[in-house]
Amino acid sequence: MKNTHNNAERGNVLFLILIAVALFAALSYAVTQSSRSGGGSTDRETSILSGASMTQYPAGLRTSVVRMILSGTDVTEIQFDAPDAILAANEGASVFHPRGGGALFQEAPANLMANNQAGTWFFNGNWDVPGIGLSDSADGNDLIAFLPGISRGVCTAVNEELNFVEDITDCFNTDGAVPHINTTLTQANIRENIQIDTGGVTFPTTDQEDLANATSACTAFIGHPAGCFFDAGTNGGEYVYYAVLLER
């Protein structure tokens, strides 16, 4: 009976995962297709195409993470060390190693970024996206990919494709189709990677902040596994893209 129960649970998990992967693929396809509709400026079409490439990368990483979990790796053991920093003893738990997730490690293309230089992806469990997985518990921290420093045009184009523009009317502060994040949170919450090569960040063991403004009725992020926001932070702030790799 125990094996039958476990097999049923695994079957249900696999089914949900396949649906999630399909939804991410559909999102990337929708962003790409929208560029063919015409009627927009060249800058907007360029932003849409750039946004499509940005959404595709975390979708591939999500597949790698899911495969690792199905193979028996616990989510709290998964690491995102760069290939040249992976410890031999940690290869099987590394997303960017062939013995682990086998995912491609890469920087974000310069045409996505506000400074026109290659961007750095960050992977951490410091956030809880409302309406995604569990909430208000130590097990509710979602595994999320962040790309800070993208251009305003790319950020706006992606959110419009994700219908964020329909969800931000009750947010305390917005920038066109871009909601502002809770300004009490710092950029350090985003710019952290789950890694162990130098004793870096590990998966949090306590509930973290919601990816929303805690002092308003802003519902822009609720139920959205991906999107873009403005983080006031420091140095004038920055636009940040996020994509949930694993709901918890």
Image (cartoon, rainbow, N blue to C red):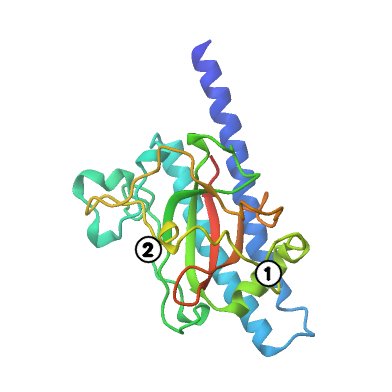
Instruction: Find the residue positioned furthest to the left.
Output: 88
- At label 1, which amino acid type do we have? Thr
For this view, does 43 lie left or right of residue 126? right
Residue at x 66%, y 52% (from the top left corner): 23
| Element on which disc 1 rests | strand
- In the image, residue 160 sits, relative to residue 5, either above or below, namely below
Q: Which mark is residue 91?
A: none
- In the image, residue 45 sits, relative to residue 90, either above or below, namely below
Q: Which mark is residue 174?
A: 1
Residue 236: give x, y in percent of width and height.
Answer: 49, 77
Q: Nearer the viewer, residue 93 or 243?
A: 243
Packing grade of label 1 (10 A; few <14, some 14-19, many >=20) is some
Which one is earlier in the sequence, the residue at label 2 or at label 1? Answer: 2
Residue at x 41%, y 78% (from the top left corner): 118
Q: Nearer the viewer, residue 79 or 167?
A: 167
- At label 2, which amino acid type do we have? Phe
- Classify residue 106 by image quadrant: bottom left
CB-based contact (under 8 Å), mark 2 and mark 1? no
Packing grade of label 2 (10 A; few <14, some 14-19, many >=20) is some
Pointer 2: what residue? Answer: 105
| Element on which disc 2 rests | loop
Residue 147: give x, y in percent of width and height.
Answer: 48, 66
Instruction: Find the residue positioned furthest to the bottom.
Output: 42
- In the image, residue 214 sits, relative to residue 173, either above or below, namely above
Residue 72: give x, y in percent of width and height.
Answer: 40, 34
* Marks 2 and 1, how far apart at CA: 33 Å
For this view, does 119 lie left or right of residue 184? left
Residue 227: give x, y in percent of width and height.
Answer: 61, 62
